Image: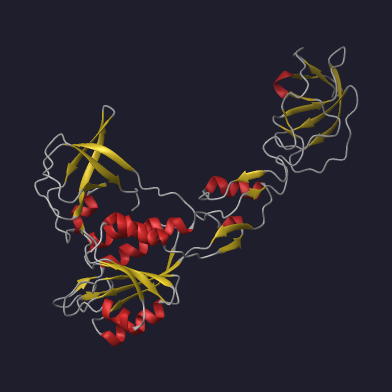
């Protein structure tokens, strides 16, 4: 049995890659860039009017311009503007060659015959003109490597004429939930059955971790069936199993893996919950075998699997750790490092945390009510009210 830090170190050293791929920007939300992305065009792509008004070349002595054309946004422009001429333009219009300034329509008086009078003597070159490349220029970095692309980035990539971008592939993950008692939630439970809640929780945690679940199944406690499903799962990039990893008569995951020739890195960790945690490789694919109850599954995923997944995409761990002041007592000690469900809040620039009363690793409601995990080092003395503890903030959608 090894420590949490030792387990993290072993997982971190495991060398694995899922590669990269090219995708179109409109499909790139939530994907992670694997290189710096360069603009393929200037933005704006031409000199553009920033307001409704008149494009002009100069300031006449009498402030009167002869209006010679009208250009709407989207119109092609072949005209060159000349001295004492004005062209009616609108926000987003491409400006004619020779434009020195745009006079907003509020500062114009229309004269008989169609000429205009500039009523504001303050003529400024470049006024209300969005210059070509003002936002960004062609062949310049617009998005750096390792960026999780959001909707604003998609708009930027489209504007930059990027038809394809290079991103890290999403790891494809298979989930096997083992246990004769488990059923899919769409099915009617029989006496002795429970819904495989950990299976669905894991599926969604995977989606939130920049990966995808390409296969999930419930497997009965049968060695032949488990080995068959493990072989099928090994076609994915990563394998995750829940349940059947301890030392009971029907804990068959480890014996089945051994018969399939897997390479074990470690089994059992000095932590609570999550002690019977296994990590190794099957046919070169990393395999994480988690305890079956949902709280152990969740804690082990957050502490061990999530950092592994984001490391594949060269991201930093986005799970925040803070110091917080206890508002109640933690009334037990353990020889194992413990992660307790808690609820933190801010008050007058301080962080306070309440350790939830019920900490049994089968209680899903308490997990749902928590927003952090309180770390209690192994062999610690009892923590009393007002003690400062380390907490791990749970990402909002996790």
What is the quadrant of the N terminus in the image? bottom left
Is residue 389 toward the left or the right of residue 315 in the image?
left
Q: Count up the numbered dots.
A: 0
User: Can the viewer see residue 205 in this picture?
Assistant: no
Q: Residue furthest bottom?
A: 224
On the image, the x and y values in percent for residue 188 come to 22, 75
Q: Residue furthest left?
A: 331
User: Can the viewer see residue 67 in this picture?
Assistant: yes
User: Is 393 above or below relative to 365?
Assistant: above
At 46% across and 64% down in the image, what residue appears? 15
User: Is 9 above or below relative to 51?
Assistant: below
Q: How is the image coloured?
A: secondary structure
Is residue 80 toward the left or the right of residue 335 in the image?
right
Is residue 18 toward the left or the right of residue 130 in the image?
left
At 49% across and 56% down in the image, what residue appears? 313
Is residue 383 toward the left or the right of residue 260 in the image?
left
Choose top left, top right, bottom left or bottom right for residue 263: bottom left
At 59% across and 63% down in the image, what residue appears? 21
User: Is 383 above or below relative to 11?
Assistant: above
On the image, the x and y values in percent for residue 193 come to 18, 75
User: Is 158 above or below relative to 214?
Assistant: above
On the image, the x and y values in percent for residue 212 come to 44, 65
On the image, the x and y values in percent for residue 346 come to 27, 33
Choose top left, top right, bottom left or bottom right for residue 320: top left
Q: Nearer the viewer, residue 227 or 47?
A: 227
Q: Nearer the viewer, residue 382 or 360?
A: 382
């Amino acid at each position: 049995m090894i420590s949490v830090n030792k387990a993290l170190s072993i997982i971190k050293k495991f060398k694995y890659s899922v590669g990269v791929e090219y995708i179109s920007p409109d499909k790139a939300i939530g994907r992670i860039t694997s290189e710096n992305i360069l603009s393929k065009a200037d933005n704006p792509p031409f000199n553009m009017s920033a307001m409704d008004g008149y494009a002009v070349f100069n300031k006449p002595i009498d402030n009167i311009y002869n209006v010679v054309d009208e250009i709407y946004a989207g119109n092609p422009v072949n005209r060159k503007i000349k001295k004492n001429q004005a062209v009616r333009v609108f926000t987003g219009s491409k400006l004619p060659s020779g434009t020195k300034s745009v006079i907003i329509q509020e500062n114009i008086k229309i004269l008989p015959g169609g000429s205009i009078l500039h009523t504001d003597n303050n003529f400024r070159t470049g006024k209300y003109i969005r210059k070509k490349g003002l936002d960004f220029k062609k062949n310049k970095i617009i998005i750096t490597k390792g960026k999780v692309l959001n909707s604003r980035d998609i708009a930027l990539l489209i504007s930059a004429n990027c038809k394809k971008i290079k991103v890290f592939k999403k790891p494809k993950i298979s989930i096997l939930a083992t246990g004769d008692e488990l059923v899919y939630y769409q099915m009617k439970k029989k006496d002795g059955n429970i819904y495989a809640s950990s299976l669905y929780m894991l599926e969604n945690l995977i989606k939130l971790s920049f990966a995808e679940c390409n296969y999930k199944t419930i497997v009965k406690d049968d060695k032949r069936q488990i080995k068959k499903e493990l072989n099928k799962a090994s076609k994915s990039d990563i394998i995750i199993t829940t349940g059947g990893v301890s030392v009971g008569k029907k804990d068959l995951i480890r014996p089945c893996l051994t018969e399939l020739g897997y390479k074990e890195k470690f089994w059992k960790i000095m932590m609570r919950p999550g002690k019977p945690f296994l990590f190794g490789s099957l046919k070169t694919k990393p395999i994480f075998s988690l305890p079956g109850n949902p709280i152990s599954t969740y804690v082990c995923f957050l502490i061990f699997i999530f950092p592994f997944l984001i490391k594949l995409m060269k991201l930093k761990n986005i799970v925040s750790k803070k110091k917080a002041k206890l508002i109640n007592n933690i009334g037990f000690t353990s020889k194992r490092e413990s992660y307790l469900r808690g609820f933190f809040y801010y008050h007058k620039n301080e962080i306070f945390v309440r350790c939830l009363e019920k900490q049994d690793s089968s209680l899903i409601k308490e997990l749902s009510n928590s927003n952090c995990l309180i770390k209690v080092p192994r062999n610690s003395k009892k923590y009393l009210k007002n003690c400062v503890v380390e907490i791990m903030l749970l990402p909002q959608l996790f």
